[in-house]
Image (cartoon, rainbow, N blue to C red):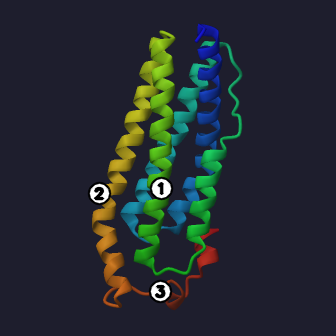
């Protein structure tokens, strides 16, 4: 593959990532608001701060490439965000909703890890060493976010299972908190 073809592909991958990250800047506050578990809510708020940094790193790379920082619509992330929004409209109890939100968030993280790994590999081939470092930093943060979600799921998912059996927790409706208001 000629180098300029790989360069074009690399820039397109960066544009896709830029769109994905900007979509997440809008989606993460909704996920935080939909979470009933305080640690889960805090994890989303922290990841929102990191996601803003991810956008800044991508802007830095675009600047170094002499390219405009803009995104081509990332339809993959758009789909994942829509699925997450649909999940949050369900009438689950708190613990089950938190488990569902974790699942949606981990799908997002895995998508991002794959995309950043690809972009990093292209940057390595193009000998864009500073880009490799920036992309690697973001990739490690995405992995850490996924690990944090896994850790939280180990506490939250058993509670969700117990809630389903009627042993723990209450419905959001029963507590006077409507789904539409929490997820809006």
What is the CA distance from the residue labelled 3 to the residue labelled 2? Answer: 24 Å
Mark 3 falls on what kind of element?
loop
Q: In this picture, is 162 found above or below 42? A: below
- For label 2, count other residues whose C-alpha is less than 10 Å away and answer few (under 14), some (14-19) or many (20+): few
Return the disc, 3 or 2, that comes first in the chain's sequence.
Answer: 2
Q: Would you name the residue on which mark 3 appears? A: 171
Residue 140 is drawn in which quadrant?
top left
52 relative to 132, above or below: below
Q: Position of residue 24 (x, y in %)?
A: 58, 48
Residue located at (35% from left, 43% from top)? 144
At which x and y percent is residue 126? 51, 11
Residue under pointer 1: 105
Which one is in front in this view, the residue at disc 1 or the one at disc 3? 1
Residue on which disc 2 sits? 151
Q: Quadrant of residue 137?
A: top left
Left or right of 90, for residue 38: left
Mark 1–mark 2 Cα distance, whole angstroms, equals 13 Å
Side (left or right) of 178 relative to 41: right
Res 62 quadrant in image: top right
Q: Is residue 94 left or right of residue 166?
A: right
Which residue is nearer to you in this view: 42 or 113?
A: 113
Q: Tell me the SS state at disc 1.
A: helix
Relative to 56, say whether 51 is above or below: below
Q: State whether residue 95 is above or below residue 114.
A: below
């Amino acid at each position: 593959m000629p180098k300029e073809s790989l360069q074009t592909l690399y820039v397109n991958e960066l544009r896709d990532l830029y769109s994905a990250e900007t979509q997440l800047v809008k989606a993460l506050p909704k996920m935080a608001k939909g979470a009933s578990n305080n640690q889960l809510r805090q994890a989303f708020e922290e990841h929102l701060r990191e996601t803003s940094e991810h956008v800044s790193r991508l802007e830095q790379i675009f600047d170094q490439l002499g390219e405009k920082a803009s995104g081509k619509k990332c339809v993959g992330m758009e789909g994942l965000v829509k699925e997450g929004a649909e999940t949050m409209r369900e009438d689950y109890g708190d613990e089950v909703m938190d488990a569902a939100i974790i699942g949606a968030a981990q799908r997002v993280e895995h998508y991002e890890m794959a995309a950043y790994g690809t972009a990093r590999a292209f940057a390595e081939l193009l000998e864009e060493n500073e880009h490799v470092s920036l992309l690697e930093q973001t990739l490690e943060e995405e992995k850490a976010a996924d690990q944090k979600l896994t850790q939280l799921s180990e506490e939250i998912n058993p509670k969700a299972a117990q809630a389903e059996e009627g042993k723990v927790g209450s419905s959001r409706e029963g507590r006077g908190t409507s789904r539409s208001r929490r997820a809006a």
